[in-house]
Image (tube, rainbow, N blue to C red):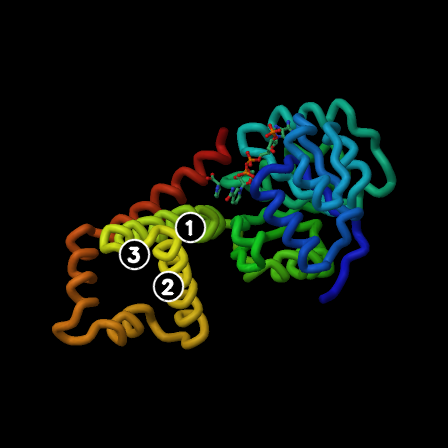
Amino acid sequence: MAKLDERIGFIGGGNMAFAIGSGLVSCGIVKPSQVLVSGPHIENLARWRELGAVTTDENCEVLEHTDIVFICVKPHILGPCVAQLKYKHVPSAKDASKLIVSVLAGTTLKTLEEKFDFIESSGLKVIRTMPNTSMQVGEGCTVYTGNSRVTHQDLEKVHLMLNALGLAQQVPEHMIDAVTGVAGCGPAFVYTIIEALADGGVKQGVPRAMALQFAAQTLLGAAKTVLITGKHPAVLRDEVCSPGGSTIVGVHELEKGNLRATLINAVEKATQRSAELGKK
Ligand SMILES: NC(=O)C1=CN([C@@H]2O[C@H](COP(=O)(O)OP(=O)(O)OC[C@H]3O[C@@H](n4cnc5c(N)ncnc54)[C@H](OP(=O)(O)O)[C@@H]3O)[C@@H](O)[C@H]2O)C=CC1
Ligand SMILES: O=C(O)[C@@H]1CCC=N1
């Protein structure tokens, strides 16, 4: 696995940041000592210290002492967070080469460039991403796009990190809210399906722990089959449905319950909400 020499910063050390940071350390791309994380409550950063990362309650330390800075606060916290950074930031010669990487839902490159313009008057390098929490186990799905200052080498570096933790793909910015609806929020939709599938097993008499394991493994296997065979899910579904058998009876129930329309609606609403979050 390739290694990065850069120091990696996280402003905001919550769930998404930890999925990325712990994933990068686990796969060996960076050493824990290269990682610096900030948040307002130092006690909430204990898991980062257990990982071997350095923690601080001063966001400006992360901005000043790291090369690739992941911004991982909630979208509505970006304003106050930047106001505080602006007040405390000490300009340095390294500012021009700094890479700001946002994971914020809905928050556009334009907004990010405007918010962070205090760091570097001649223009800052900004990358907007939409990751997901499955990065913590190396099976994430991330899309990203950079502003005009970002170089090919910067994109390669970010791709190396994100792709080491699953699938990473550069996309045009207009696609990012839609991908948020599918892949950023998707794990929550799928956890709901796993839980419900397991509940079904429990109702039929399978012990809870077994039912959960079987449901999760079934989703993993089905997902892998789609990715590896390249077959359309409908074709694969047909391979499971024996004529007059048990699966088609279950599939009929899913259709009666509008599972597919419900999932399509969930992605649509989540996409709309993502775009709204960036306007706050
Ligand atoms: N969770 C997910 O699946 C995904 C999330 N995202 C994006 O990631 C971002 C973070 O979300 P998520 O990790 O879920 O949220 P969390 O609440 O888990 O993390 C947010 C973190 O921000 C910290 N924080 C609050 N105020 C400040 C501040 N002023 N300066 C620095 N840090 C601060 C919080 O610290 P404390 O708790 O101590 O207050 C908390 O650790 C969001 O913008 C979201 O859109 C993107 C893709 C997927
Ligand atoms: O719920 C949210 O807004 C964030 C963005 C994608 C996943 N979690």
Of discs 3 and 1, which sits in the foreground?
3
Residue highlighted by disc 2: 218
When the figure is inspected, residue 40 is found, relative to residue 73, above or below; the finding is above
When the figure is inspected, residue 211 is found, relative to residue 41, above or below; the finding is below
Classify residue 52 by image quadrant.
top right
What's the CA distance linking mark 3 and mark 2?
15 Å
Residue highlighted by disc 1: 186
> Looking at the picture, how far across and down is residue 48, in whole percent?
69, 41
Residue highlighted by disc 3: 206
Label tally: 3
Cβ–Cβ under 8 Å for marks 1 and 2: no
| Quarter of the N terminus within the rendering | bottom right
> Looking at the picture, how far across and down is residue 76, in whole percent?
54, 29
Compare marks 3 and 1 and give the one earlier in the sequence.
1
Question: What's the residue type where badge 3 is placed?
Answer: Val
At a point 19% along the width and 61% down the height, the residue shown is 250
What's the CA distance linking mark 3 and mark 1?
27 Å
In this rendered view, identify the residue nearer to me: 198 or 273.
198
